[in-house]
Image (spheres, rainbow, N blue to C red):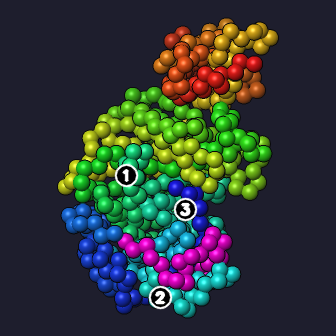
Amino acid sequence: MQRRQFLSRSGSTLAATGLAAGLPWLSAVAQAAGLKPVGAPQAFDYAMLKGRARDLAAKPYAARSTTLPAGISNLNWDQHQGIRFRDDHALWGDDKLRFVAKFFHLGLFFKSPVRMYEVSGGQATELAYDPAMFDYGQSGVDGTKLPADLGFAGFRLNYHTDPVRDVAAFLGASYFRAVGGEWQYGQSARGLAINTAQPYPEEFPDFIGYWLEKPDPKSPSLTVYALLDSPSISGAYRFVITPGDTQIMDLDVALYPRKTIERMGIAPCTSMYQTGENDRRMGWDWRGEIHDTDGLAMHTGRGEWVWRPLTNPAQLQFNAFQDNNPRGFGLMQRDRNFDHYQDDGVFYDKRPSLWVEPKAGWGAGSVQLVEIPTVDETFDNIVAFWNPAEKPQAGQELLFAYRLHWGGNPPAVRMPLARCVATRTGLGGVVGQKRTGYSRRFAVDFAGGDFALLNEKTKVEAVITASRGKIELTSARPLAAIQGWRAMFDIRPDGDSTAPIDLRMYLQADGQPLTETWLYQWAPPPVAERIVY
């Protein structure tokens, strides 16, 4: 997915007025989901939303229209960015609450309206689009010529501590994103992933309606409900959003498949990795590193902490890490040193990590990681999610509860072991000696944990395994610059195969693990490219 499809920051607004007539697709979805006409208050709670999702799944899928009015059907990026929301129309703007909601205008990549509701006192009222909510500025759009029932593309939230910068945004398919204390957007999350990295097109479920519950004036949290729909599944979502240095989102999810789903992704994280210290394949830019996140972290059901650095592979890579009742996983941006990026425009050093914490046993399945080749930082090429071992079947109700942690270093990911802080690769062999064959050098740095308890006589060793090939020149030594340790080794491919080699390593002392487990997947180059210099 192109990042600009989600990273659009168009302004928008809202008024709680009735709407006499909806677009054709709105009528079809409303009827299927059991919604009342626009503007009519209706009783609402999460149980009712689950019922609507269940009823929706029992009916044939009603595709949404992607046809926009002529005035906005051909907007380019700059024109769409030129449509700004008028802050004086914000939902709850005059109510002295800790939250206000603002809305995104349709256009560009966002072609299907999403229904918006305010929930107050157990009653939901639909919110109507009005072109007066928007400043069309230099966009070239004449708002007076747009249909009165145009609708919205999504919404964003502002917290009382900063009326200008938003803390979360929901826009495009089932995508949403949030910030931590560094106020920087980066990777995004999704409500659901369907058939990602299969030999046929991926399905992108849509949030077709949002219900924003008016919070208590002193409440630090906001509850948002969402109705999801796609050809394969429908679902009901409840978000409890609490901004902070680490922003917390508590989710309850009820899913109702229409048919068997080959690969369903729960709590998908979507990110970008173009180039970094361990993968310079696309490192032609003047900036040293370009990525939203640099690794997949996992805390397994057995209690093992695992770190898998990300790559920008020459061919799509798919990995499944089997587990039972995972304790957490997420795409992390561990490297937060500005000097490594030198980007004073989009600030990759401030991009938030996203940690998924299941609240109840998810059973057997796998954390799955998809890495897609990219030549451009505007393309989200990294996806990670939980895939249940049992394929969803039509007629089932599938319930999931989890917590999302958005921030630079979420407390939930702090571990008692030393963590990997850098992975570097290069040509193997011994400097000053003639190389007798091709090998790849890996230098992996660890910091934190119990390293401070070691003395100069403590024997620390690197425990390394490889799926094939030969491990050579293994070492582990203190690294004073980071108050940690560096492990180094070479891997020599066996034969001419370019199939990936799976690597696994951790440091130990007297049989006690000192670090998390480092995983890597390295694909040897073709024989003709194995230059030993």
72 and 41: which is toward the camera: 72
Location of residue 17 with respect to 2 vertically, above or below: below
Q: Are marks 2 and 3 in contact (CB under 8 Å)?
A: no
Would residue 74 be found to the left or right of residue 17 on screen? right
Judged from the image, the secondary structure of the residue bearing numbered disc 3 is helix
Q: Amino acid at mark 3?
A: Phe
**Residue 246 image point, x, y percent:** 56, 51
Asked if residue 525 lies left or right of residue 338, the reply is left
Q: Which residue in the protein does label 2 denote?
A: 147
Rendered view: 399 above or below 388:
below
Q: Residues within 10 Å of mark 2 (few under 14, many from 20)?
A: some
Secondary element at tag 2: loop
- Give me the residue at 64% from left, 29% from top: 423
Residue 194 — which label? 1
Q: Is 195 in front, or is 136?
A: 195
Q: Is residue 241 left or right of residue 47?
A: right
Q: Which residues are magenta?
A: 64-89
Pick the residue in front: 503 or 338. 503
Residue at point 39% right, 88% down? 19
Q: Residues within 10 Å of mark 3 (few under 14, many from 20)?
A: many
Quarter holding the C terminus is top right
> Reading the chain from its start, which is encountered first: label 3 or label 1?
3
Q: Position of residue 89 (x, y in %)?
A: 56, 83
**Three-letter code for the amino acid on which mark 1 is drawn:** Ile
Q: For the point 60% across and 88% down, which residue is it?
A: 142
